[in-house]
Image (cartoon, rainbow, N blue to C red):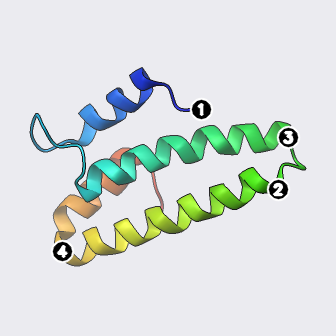
Amino acid sequence: MLTKTKKTRAIKAVQKHKDDTGSASVQVAVLSQKIDELALHLKKHTKDKHSRRGLLQMVADRRTHLKYLEKSDKREYSKLVKSLGLKK
């Protein structure tokens, strides 16, 4: 589970202004944190199929946000991918 402090840290790392909590960049950062935590859980609990399905949904959602960001603002997209360590 993603704690409030980890989520806040992820948001502050990529937000554009003080009240930015819903932009595509912030959503990708939060989803990436959730995905990392769930991947660790699934390494321990290999038979947890329901969590695996949730992980796949989060990955698809993150991919959708990344596609949107790439289409709308290529500079922000490349900066975000580099800062989060995502491969394209």
Of circles 2 and 3, the one toward us is 2
Residue 34 marker: none
Q: Which label sits on residue 1?
A: 1
The answer to whether residue 9 is seen in the rendering is: yes
Question: Which residue corresponds to mark 4?
Answer: 72
Please report the residue visible at 46 percent of the width from the left and 49 percent of the height from the top.
Answer: 31
Q: Is residue 88 visible?
A: no
**Residue farthest to the right, as pictured:** 47
Q: Amino acid at mark 3?
A: His
> Do residues under tags 1 and 4 come within 8 Å of each other at their CB atoms?
no
Residue under label 3? 45
Three-letter amino acid code of the residue under disc 2:
Lys
Of 80 and 12, the residue lying toward us: 12
Which is closer to the viewer, label 2 or label 4? Answer: 2
* Residue 49 disc label: 2
Question: Is residue 88 left or right of 82 when viewed as pictured?
Answer: right
